[in-house]
Image (spheres, helix red, strand yellow):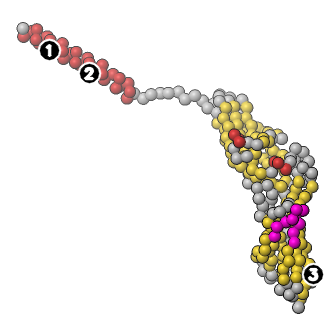
């Protein structure tokens, strides 16, 4: 009986050891480092616009140049840059493609320069004025794209002024006429900017800075008119601080000699 009992105890102990060993194996496997192979990926970057605005008149084209690069551990098959009008590519109103793209590098890494041309004598129209974004993309192991920033495409503007009479008598009225025009890409001419507020400023001859004296709205043809009382010699100037589609416009300072 004692021998049988000892045999059962020994067998039971051995079975417990095997059970513990069996339970310990999964734990050991969980603690072992897991080596996972990450698939190669395509990368693209750059394309940041060098300026926050591009100004175009009525005759001379203007350009935007963006630099970008792409890499892939297997092969860079295709890559490029393009512009979209709007706040994001998914809400783009229009797309603009480069006139040329030049790339250097290897099959695994490419460095490129894309040149975009805005020609008022070509496809550029008034509807293109506003906010644009730059998108760069590349195709290799996978297809990736990135929005690299935004810039404003604006219509060039001109401001004219003529203060009369010259000279003027102190206490009499000075009439400050002017005009505000901007590039019309549909007609390749400068046309009046209607019903927008323009600042009329003045400065004394021995001062460097202008001070605001009035805000004047243009009429339907972009013309300006303000009347002020002559006090002392002054320079007068009209100015506009730009908007979503139109660039800054500042007239020269028109001098009025005021006499007693």
What numbered label is drawn on residue 9?
A: 1
Foreground mark, 2 or 3?
3
Is label 2 in contact with label 3 (beta carbons under 8 Å)? no
Q: Residue visible at 87% across and 72% down?
A: 225
Q: Assign a secondary structure to mark 3.
A: loop
Q: Quadrant of residue 5?
A: top left
**Mark earlier in primary sequence (2, 3):** 2
Q: Local crowd at mark 2 within 10 Å, few (<14), some, or many (≥20)?
A: few
Whole-percent x, y for residue 1 in the image:
6, 8
What numbered label is drawn on residue 74?
A: none
The range drawn in magenta is 216-225
Residue at the spot of label 2: 20
The residue most toward the bottom is 260
Can see residue 46? no
Q: Local crowd at mark 1 within 10 Å, few (<14), some, or many (≥20)?
A: few
Can see residue 88? yes
Q: Residue visible at 69% across and 44% down?
A: 88
Q: Nearer the viewer, residue 88 or 11?
A: 88
Q: Nearer the viewer, residue 83 or 15?
A: 83
73 drawn magenta: no
Q: With respect to residue 136, does 237 lie above or below?
A: below
What numbered label is drawn on residue 166?
A: 3
Figure quadrant of the C terminus: bottom right
Is label 2 in contact with label 1 (beta carbons under 8 Å)? no
Q: Quadrant of residue 245?
A: bottom right
Whole-percent x, y for residue 217 in the image:
82, 67
Q: Assign a secondary structure to mark 2.
A: helix
Q: With respect to residue 135, does 260 lie above or below?
A: below
Foreground mark, 1 or 3?
3
Work out how far the residue at label 2 is from the one at label 3, CA to CA, in angstroms.
Answer: 109 Å
Q: Nearer the viewer, residue 99 or 35?
A: 99
């Amino acid at each position: 009986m004692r021998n049988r009992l000892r045999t059962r105890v020994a067998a039971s102990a051995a079975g417990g050891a095997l059970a513990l060993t069996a339970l310990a194996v999964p734990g050991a496997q969980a603690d072992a480092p897991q080596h996972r192979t990450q698939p190669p990926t395509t990368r693209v970057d750059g394309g940041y616009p060098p300026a926050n605005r591009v100004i175009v008149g009525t005759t001379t084209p203007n350009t935007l140049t963006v630099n970008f690069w792409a890499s892939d551990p297997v092969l860079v098959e295709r890559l490029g840059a393009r512009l979209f009008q709007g706040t994001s590519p998914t809400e783009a109103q229009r797309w603009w493609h480069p006139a040329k793209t030049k790339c250097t590098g290897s099959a695994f890494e490419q460095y490129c320069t894309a040149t975009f041309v805005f020609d008022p004598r070509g496809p550029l129209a008034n509807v293109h004025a506003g906010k644009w974004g730059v998108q760069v993309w590349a195709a290799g192991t996978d297809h990736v794209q990135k929005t690299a920033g935004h810039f404003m495409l604006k219509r060039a503007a001109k401001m004219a002024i003529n203060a009369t009479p010259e000279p003027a008598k102190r206490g009499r009225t000075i009439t400050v006429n002017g005009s505000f025009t901007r590039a019309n890409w549909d007609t390749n001419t400068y046309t009046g900017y209607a019903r927008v507020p323009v600042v009329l400023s003045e400065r004394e001859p021995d001062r460097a800075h202008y001070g605001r004296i009035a805000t004047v709205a243009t009429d339907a043809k972009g013309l300006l008119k303000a009347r002020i009382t002559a006090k002392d010699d002054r320079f007068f100037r009209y100015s506009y601080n730009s908007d979503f589609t139109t660039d800054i416009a500042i007239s020269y300072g028109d001098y009025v000699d005021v006499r007693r």
